Image (cartoon, grey):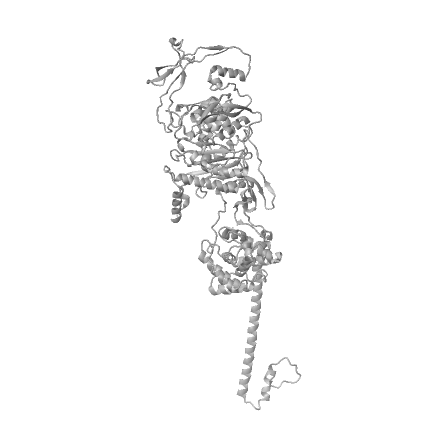
Amino acid sequence: MSDLDDIFDDTKPSNKPVQSPILKESKSLDLPTLSQEIERRARKRRILIGWFKFFGFILVMGLMVAVIGLVGAYLYCKPRYDLAQTFDLDNLEKLEVASRIVDRNGQELGRIFVQNRRPISIDEVSDHFINALIAAEDGSFYTHDGVDYKGVLRAVYLNFKSKEINQGASTITQQLARNTFELRDRTVSRKVTEAFLARRIEKELGDKQRVLELYLNRIYFGSGYYGIAAASEGFFGKEAKDLTIVEAATLAGVIRNPYYRSPRKYPDSCKKTRDYVLSLMRREGYIDRETMDRAIKSPVRAVDKQSLTGKSGYVYEKVRQEVIDLIGAEEVNSGGFVIETTIDSELQTVASQAMKDQVAMIEEHPQYSGQTLAEYKEIKRNYSENDDNTATLSPPEYLQGAMLLIENRTGAILAQVGGRDFNDSMFDRTTLGRYRTGTVFKPFVYSAAFEKGFFPGTLLNDTPLNNKTVMIGGTSGILGEWGTENPNNIYENTVTARQALSLGKNAATVRIGEKAGLSTVVDIAERAGFEFSGDLKKYNATMLGRNTASLSDVALAYTIFPNEGVRPEKTHIISNIRDAEGNVIYSPTIGKASEAAIDRYTAYQISSVLSDSFESGTARKARERYGLGNFPVAGKTGTEYNFTDNWFAGFTSEVTCVGWIGFDSRKKIYDGAFSSDTVLPAWTKVMNAAAKVTDPQPFRPPVDAEKVEICLQSGELACDDCYKTVVNKDGISSQVRSTYVEYLRPDTDLSSICHIHARGGTLRGALRDVLTYKPKKRTPIVFSAEPVLPISPTIIGDDPYNATKPVHAMVAMPVAAEDAEPEMGKNGLPIARPDVFSSPYEDTPIQRVRLARPTPIQFE
């Protein structure tokens, strides 16, 4: 230390007087120089002290800023840390899982969901996808604690450099936290909370594979697919464990921007991202260069998007609505239920395709003039291309078709086709649509008659009927015979009830319905499930199906025939519902209607008669042309007046199927559109398919029914002489039995023997057969026959169905006195003489035949 420094050093104690160094050097320095030196050294010390003070200040201020910063950071982070601790990590396990709809064999039909997701184990995921995901999203996933700090600093630098937030450093764990707890806002506060939450997740789960599994099942891949399982099935039609390297890289690239990187909508953008992911996989060592180069050359491929509503939108919507009614919408959308239905997927496919093909074929008919499906699709496409609101698009007006197949005993729906295209019209025509039943209603008229004591062998008058009786299509002329499914109907004068129903005779049906009583017909129909609006039940038009009904109504009503007179209470499509743990939480109660509509004898008789429809009646084309299998089946065609609604309803011992074709707004399909040509072909395909899985059995009569042999010509008990002559193709004639077997209820009043064939057809022979068949005490019996004359009523008005005018009809007429003793012929019978009389219907004379009054016959 210099002497000058000693002057200012007050730290050294000294008892001797201080001698100034200046005095020491005074001998060598002059006074001015000494002053300068003192000033220089003082200035240097002041500067030094100043620097010490400055750095001290800086240090103090730095420490203060640090403390304030730390306190501020603590105050800022503490609530966000606390917030991160409040989240319930159990929610990581709670996924909105789609409720699956399956058919009776366990095959998936569709899903009900808010988020279409099917959780799977990480062991069920391809290693290629795991590698692609880590390479693309989080290269340090296996080493960080939930937050990639280097990545955060890199993102901060890049965002500062670009002067906008375009880089993130979210790890897979942070993305899991964000998606689970809806941390969506792009703020620093959210990022801090997310980071704390990610660290907490990693700490509490303690298993990287579990974190990865939760992420894979939650993340959104676009196009409605949540989780890797749904994305793999949706984009590539395969399980997640079967993904290839190219497919894995494609899905990994989709995550950051699911919409604009979709392999369906934007394949070019998707390919760029996919190739970048492949390069990252190469950099991380998951694939070699050769594999990368080969994969990059692959085009982007994705399967067509499958409807999430399953094979039939109508089935899906019906199930969805019913299950929501049962357990609630919120539960269904997130509960992961398995909804087991009664649907048979194979039968559903057959029914849907058969109806679509058949209606499309009808649109090609030369006389069809309505809108076609193709025309409506073009209108809809134009709306879409012009960005018009499709909500303003008019509903389709093209021809529709519907089909319903149910189990007879339970009412379970096996197949349901509610229309041609669910995307065009969600209106379910099997349950919501109500259409005039037309001639498909006739079996219920005959049911009423058989309940009243008539039977299939009852003879009916098959001649024209004045339309005033029914008033369908007008009040004049004769009733049309559209029910015969034949534009050239031929009246047969007399037919059995069996023939009248199987051949679809309108006039004969009305006549037997009148005999049974309209009130009886309506009562039986209502017990079978039909409803009648207004005063319709008061008019005979009801007997030809002027009432409306849904396909479900008709199907349930027809089950009374194979079910011995009873029907299921209602149809159902859900067999049970299971929760995520497999517990059954719902199972339907299957019941029958409170009372039988008809007795078991009538049920069998109607089934037997409707079986004839396929052999010699209106449905014979099913076997002759459409290939109906050789199994027991019964059914009825149904054509409404003016060819507006076409039906076919039929059944086996196991199932009932009803088909309908028509317009939503009632109008003509085309002239001559009979149901045997329109609906029957599609119905045949469905029933052939159903027969393969349901094993139809013969229709069996009640055990106590009386078996009798009936003459086809007389409708009476057959005798030994009931034969007819048949000529074969070689011109050789032979005698064959002209009878058939009926099963009657025990109290049926049928005791007369065939009056045509008994003992050569003579009245005496018939009477002898009666006495032989049913022996009684012989008492005198007197028969007297009133003479009858034929009349030909005048037909007024149009006859659109080419109905044949009657040649004659028989009425009783008085006999003149001179005819009291008629001229007898060689055969011992009175001779009939022609004469001319006035018609009671008009003034025009007509030719009549006067039958002489026979003399009373008395015998013992």
> What x and y, as percent, mark residue 418?
47, 39
**Viewer-closest of 472 and 332:** 472
Does residue 501 appear in the picture of this structure? Answer: yes
Query: Which percent across, then down, holds residue 107?
Result: 54, 45
User: Front-most of 288 and 827?
Assistant: 827
Look at the picture and state if 19 lies above or below 618.
below
Q: Is residue 808 left or right of residue 684?
A: left
Instruction: Please tell me whether residue 569 is drawn above or below residue 715 in the rendered image.
Output: below
Please, which residue is most extreme toward the bottom here?
A: 27
**Residue 83 seen:** no
Q: Quick one: 107 or 776, which is closer to the camera?
A: 776
- Split into 4 quadrants, where in the image is the N terminus? bottom right
Residue 763 in picture, x, y percent from top left: 47, 15
Quadrant for residue 53, please give it: bottom right
**Above or below, comparing residue 598 to residue 576 in the picture:** above
Identify the residue at horizontal 60%, vertical 88% (top origin): 24
In x, y percent, where is residue 494?
A: 44, 23
Left or right of 235, for residue 673: left
Point out the residue furthest to the left here.
844
Tag count:
0
User: Front-most of 120 and 38?
Assistant: 120
